[in-house]
Protein backbone atom coordinates (compact mmCIF):
# COMPACT_ATOMS: atom_id res chain seq x y z
CA UNK A 1 0.00 0.00 0.00
CA UNK A 2 1.22 3.50 -0.83
CA UNK A 3 0.71 6.46 1.48
CA UNK A 4 1.35 10.12 0.72
CA UNK A 5 3.27 11.88 3.46
CA UNK A 6 2.82 15.67 3.33
CA UNK A 7 5.62 18.07 4.10
CA UNK A 8 5.29 19.59 7.57
CA UNK A 9 6.93 22.80 6.38
CA UNK A 10 7.69 24.51 3.11
CA UNK A 11 9.12 27.97 2.33
CA UNK A 12 5.91 28.99 0.53
CA UNK A 13 3.74 28.95 3.66
CA UNK A 14 4.45 32.69 3.90
CA UNK A 15 2.21 33.16 0.83
CA UNK A 16 -0.89 31.97 2.74
CA UNK A 17 -3.22 34.89 3.51
CA UNK A 18 -6.05 35.01 6.06
CA UNK A 19 -9.38 33.54 5.01
CA UNK A 20 -11.75 36.24 3.68
CA UNK A 21 -14.25 37.51 6.26
CA UNK A 22 -17.13 35.76 4.48
CA UNK A 23 -15.40 32.38 4.80
CA UNK A 24 -15.00 29.88 1.98
CA UNK A 25 -17.58 28.34 -0.35
CA UNK A 26 -16.70 24.72 -1.09
CA UNK A 27 -19.47 24.67 -3.72
CA UNK A 28 -18.02 27.61 -5.70
CA UNK A 29 -17.57 26.90 -9.43
CA UNK A 30 -14.30 27.25 -11.29
CA UNK A 31 -13.80 30.96 -11.93
CA UNK A 32 -12.75 30.22 -15.54
CA UNK A 33 -14.97 27.40 -16.82
CA UNK A 34 -17.74 27.07 -14.23
CA UNK A 35 -16.99 23.40 -13.50
CA UNK A 36 -18.28 22.16 -10.15
CA UNK A 37 -16.65 18.73 -9.94
CA UNK A 38 -13.15 19.19 -8.51
CA UNK A 39 -12.11 22.67 -7.51
CA UNK A 40 -9.26 24.19 -5.58
CA UNK A 41 -8.95 27.57 -3.86
CA UNK A 42 -5.77 29.65 -3.99
CA UNK A 43 -4.59 30.42 -0.45
CA UNK A 44 -3.05 33.71 -1.54
CA UNK A 45 -5.89 35.44 -3.41
CA UNK A 46 -8.76 32.97 -2.76
CA UNK A 47 -9.62 32.50 -6.42
CA UNK A 48 -11.39 29.19 -7.14
CA UNK A 49 -10.24 27.20 -10.18
CA UNK A 50 -10.60 23.59 -11.35
CA UNK A 51 -8.03 20.85 -10.89
CA UNK A 52 -5.50 19.42 -13.30
CA UNK A 53 -7.90 16.50 -13.81
CA UNK A 54 -10.64 18.79 -15.15
CA UNK A 55 -9.36 21.74 -17.24
CA UNK A 56 -6.18 22.67 -15.29
CA UNK A 57 -7.34 26.21 -14.53
CA UNK A 58 -5.71 26.27 -11.07
CA UNK A 59 -2.43 25.23 -12.68
CA UNK A 60 -2.80 28.08 -15.18
CA UNK A 61 -3.61 30.45 -12.28
CA UNK A 62 -0.37 29.39 -10.61
CA UNK A 63 1.64 29.92 -13.80
CA UNK A 64 0.13 33.39 -14.29
CA UNK A 65 0.39 34.58 -10.66
CA UNK A 66 3.14 32.46 -9.07
CA UNK A 67 0.72 31.72 -6.18
CA UNK A 68 1.90 28.34 -4.95
CA UNK A 69 -0.38 27.23 -2.12
CA UNK A 70 -3.80 25.79 -3.02
CA UNK A 71 -6.46 23.90 -1.08
CA UNK A 72 -8.58 21.11 -2.55
CA UNK A 73 -12.29 21.30 -1.82
CA UNK A 74 -12.47 17.57 -2.59
CA UNK A 75 -10.38 16.33 0.33
CA UNK A 76 -9.33 19.52 2.22
CA UNK A 77 -5.67 18.88 1.40
CA UNK A 78 -3.13 21.60 0.56
CA UNK A 79 -0.72 21.40 -2.37
CA UNK A 80 2.37 23.53 -2.95
CA UNK A 81 3.11 23.82 -6.66
CA UNK A 82 6.68 25.04 -6.09
CA UNK A 83 7.57 22.14 -3.77
CA UNK A 84 5.48 19.69 -5.83
CA UNK A 85 4.11 18.23 -2.62
CA UNK A 86 1.20 18.18 -0.21
CA UNK A 87 1.78 20.28 2.90
CA UNK A 88 0.29 20.02 6.39
CA UNK A 89 1.25 22.80 8.79
CA UNK A 90 -0.59 24.78 11.51
CA UNK A 91 -0.48 27.86 9.24
CA UNK A 92 -3.05 26.07 7.06
CA UNK A 93 -5.55 25.28 9.83
CA UNK A 94 -7.67 28.42 9.38
CA UNK A 95 -8.23 27.74 5.67
CA UNK A 96 -8.70 23.99 6.15
CA UNK A 97 -11.23 24.63 8.94
CA UNK A 98 -13.14 27.17 6.81
CA UNK A 99 -13.29 24.69 3.91
CA UNK A 100 -14.41 21.86 6.20
CA UNK A 101 -17.07 24.10 7.77
CA UNK A 102 -18.38 25.03 4.31
CA UNK A 103 -18.33 21.47 2.99
CA UNK A 104 -19.62 19.56 6.02
CA UNK A 105 -21.36 22.22 8.14
CA UNK A 106 -19.04 21.66 11.07
CA UNK A 107 -15.48 22.60 12.01
CA UNK A 108 -12.54 20.24 11.73
CA UNK A 109 -12.36 17.79 14.65
CA UNK A 110 -10.66 19.55 17.54
CA UNK A 111 -11.39 23.03 16.13
CA UNK A 112 -14.95 23.29 17.48
Image (cartoon, rainbow, N blue to C red):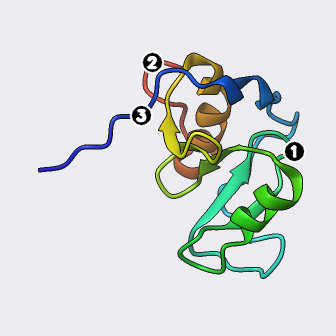
Using the numbered discs, state the Cα–Cα distance from disc 1 to disc 3 in whole angstroms.
23 Å
Left/right of residue 45 with respect to residue 111 in the rendered view = right
> Is the residue 39 above or below the residue 70 in the image?
below
Pointer 2: what residue? 110
Q: Mark 3 vs mark 2: which is more N-terminal?
A: 3
Pointer 1: what residue? 45
Q: Mark 1 vs mark 3: which is more N-terminal?
A: 3
Q: Total number of numbered labels? A: 3
Q: Position of residue 100 (x, y in %)?
A: 56, 41
- Labels 1, 2: front one: 1
Q: Position of residue 79 (x, y in %)?
A: 57, 45
Badge 3, how many Cα within 10 Å: few under 14, some, many 20+?
some
> Is the residue 58 above or below the residue 87 in the image?
below
Q: Mark 1 vs mark 2: which is more N-terminal?
A: 1
Using the numbered discs, state the Cα–Cα distance from disc 1 to disc 2 in whole angstroms.
27 Å
Q: Is residue 28 visible?
A: no
Q: Quadrant of residue 50?
A: bottom right
Left/right of residue 86 with respect to residue 72 in the rendered view = left
Residue 6 - label: 3
Residue 107 - label: none
Q: Position of residue 35 (x, y in %)?
A: 69, 79
Residue at image position (62%, 43%) is: 99
Amino acid sequence: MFAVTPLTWCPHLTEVRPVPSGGLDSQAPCNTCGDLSENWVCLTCYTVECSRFVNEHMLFHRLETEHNMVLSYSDISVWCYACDSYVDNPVLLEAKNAAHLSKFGEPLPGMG
